[in-house]
Image (tube, helix red, strand yellow):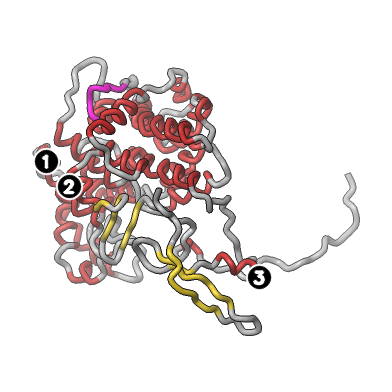
């Protein structure tokens, strides 16, 4: 079994006036920077201040590694571009959950397990009727994902490895069904049941776009593009939604509740809503002749307008996922013979400017994965309100992989961030007892 203990490489000395020097271990993982272990500070009467946890490692993990300066993203050590072009989503799911890519026999068994659980309990369909037709699909997903624990409570012992594995299979299998149902409900169409003869991505597209009244054949180019979108969004280290899943899970909450917490966190426009915001920006620009106006606004420090879909908080070089997504985007547009589409024309011209304009190049404002995925989803007819739902679908395996890993780590404990209190100091309530 792999040793999960980071290597002790040296000690750092923290000198605080009026206090004896404090020795802090400096640890090193298999990749990435050295890390100062500050756990001993609490016993010395100190703790650190780090809003957003941007300089704090809350856990150790074997799952995903990111080097934003070099544009590196690895799932279990494998480069994301290789996985996106040489594997499929279910193989990546197996990798994230098990730690290794499956052989042929392992993959066949895993795929059959997923297909065996794509149907949902029929009573769950009645839950959709509790939502208004115009409800945002993410609101529906939050509610129904959490409600799954009421239907599949036979495997909720978080300390049982077999229960954890069964739950992971159920979530990966059922979330696409629920996502497609959320869309069908919003447009008043009947639900389409899974077709297990189809691939994972093709099955999702079939549930989204098929109707009982006529045959629907999934375009293989579109299915491959959707599969790549799933792979590229499957995990991204300790982001806001994954941290939410881990924090909820640290209390012992059931995995369905934890995934619902992840979906809620992902819904935020600064996180999973980025590709939705990107498309809305393209719609706001409207036509290519208005691009110079918005480029000028983006460069103006006094203008609050910002171009969505360019640059990334983590990546200071090109987003490695965007490299694959850019190629896939053009494959889809060529396959669908889309020409003279105002929104896509704006996107194409913005892409050209960002890759050639010194202002963007110097600031590393390259088109990111959200920019290209939003264009693809729009081109194949998926409404903007469903963009974040598809992100949640793809990220479910990452969430459950991190949740599972957390259960297996001996050092895991309930999350309890500290704070700097800046409110009123001790004071007393004045006056006598109030009369009733």
Left or right of 248 on screen, residue 283? left
Left or right of 336 on screen, residue 134? right
Taking the view exactly as shown, the residue that stands out farthest to the top is: 213
* Sequence order check, earlier mark of 1 and 2: 1
- Looking at the rendered structure, the secondary structure element under dot 1 is loop
Looking at this view, is 420 or 88 the one in front?
88
Q: Which residue is mark 1?
A: 338
Q: Give the distance between the C-alpha atoms of the residues marked 1 and 2, in whole angstroms.
A: 9 Å
* Sequence order check, earlier mark of 3 and 2: 3
Magenta stretch secondary structure, dominant = loop
Say whether residue 199 is magenta.
yes
Residue 34, visible in the rendered structure:
yes
From which residue to which does the magenta span run? 194-200
Q: Residue at x 20, y 57 (%)?
A: 290
Q: Residue at x 50, y 24 (%)?
A: 151
- Looking at the rendered structure, the secondary structure element under dot 3 is loop
Q: Which residue is mark 2?
A: 344
| Mark 1 and mark 2 residues within 8 Å of each other at the beta carbon | yes
- Disc tally is 3
- Residue density around tag 2, few if under 14, some if 14–19, many if 20 or more, within 10 Å: many
- Residue density around tag 3, few if under 14, some if 14–19, many if 20 or more, within 10 Å: few
Between label 3 and label 1, give the one nearer the viewer: 3
* Sequence order check, earlier mark of 3 and 1: 3
């Amino acid at each position: 079994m792999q040793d999960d203990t980071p290597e002790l490489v040296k000690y750092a000395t923290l000198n605080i006036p009026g206090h004896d020097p404090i020795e802090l271990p400096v640890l090193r993982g298999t990749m990435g920077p050295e890390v100062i272990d500050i756990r001993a500070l609490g016993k010395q009467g100190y703790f650190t201040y780090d809003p957003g946890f941007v300089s704090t490692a809350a856990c150790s993990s074997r799952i995903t590694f990111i080097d934003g300066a070099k544009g590196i993203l690895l799932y279990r050590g494998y480069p994301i571009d290789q996985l996106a072009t040489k594997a499929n989503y279910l193989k990546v799911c197996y990798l994230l959950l098990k730690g290794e890519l499956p052989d042929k026999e392992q993959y066949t068994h895993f795929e059959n397990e997923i297909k065996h659980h794509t149907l949902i309990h029929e009573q769950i369909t009645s839950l959709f009727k509790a939502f208004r037709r115009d409800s945002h699909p993410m609101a529906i997903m939050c509610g129904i994902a959490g409600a799954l624990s009421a239907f599949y409570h036979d495997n909720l012992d978080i300390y049982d490895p077999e229960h954890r594995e069964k739950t992971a299979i159920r979530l990966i299998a059922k979330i696409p069904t629920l996502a497609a149902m959320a869309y069908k409900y919003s447009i008043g169409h009947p639900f389409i049941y899974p077709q297990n003869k189809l691939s994972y991505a093709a099955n999702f597209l079939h549930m989204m776009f098929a109707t009982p009244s006529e045959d629907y054949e999934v375009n293989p180019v579109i299915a491959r593009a959707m599969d790549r979108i799933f792979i590229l969004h499957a995990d991204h280290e300790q982001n806001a939604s994954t941290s939410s899943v881990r924090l909820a899970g640290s209390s012992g909450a059931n995995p369905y509740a934890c995934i619902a917490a992840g979906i809620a966190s992902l819904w935020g426009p600064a996180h999973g809503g980025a590709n939705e915001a990107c498309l809305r920006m393209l719609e706001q620009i409207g036509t290519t002749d208005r691009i110079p106006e918005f480029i000028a606004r983006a460069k103006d420090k006094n203008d609050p307008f910002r171009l969505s879909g360019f640059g990334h908080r983590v990546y200071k070089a090109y987003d490695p996922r965007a490299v694959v997504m850019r190629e896939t985007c053009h494959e889809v547009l060529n396959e669908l013979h889309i020409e003279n589409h105002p929104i896509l024309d704006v996107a194409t011209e913005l892409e050209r400017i960002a890759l050639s304009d010194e202002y963007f190049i110097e600031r590393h404002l390259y088109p990111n994965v959200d920019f290209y995925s939003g264009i693809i989803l729009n081109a194949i007819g998926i409404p903007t309100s469903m963009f974040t739902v598809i992100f949640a679908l793809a990220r479910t395996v990452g969430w459950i992989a991190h949740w599972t890993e957390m259960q297996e780590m001996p050092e895991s404990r309930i999350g309890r961030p500290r704070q700097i209190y800046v409110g009123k100091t001790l004071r007393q309530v004045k006056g006598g007892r109030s009369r009733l």
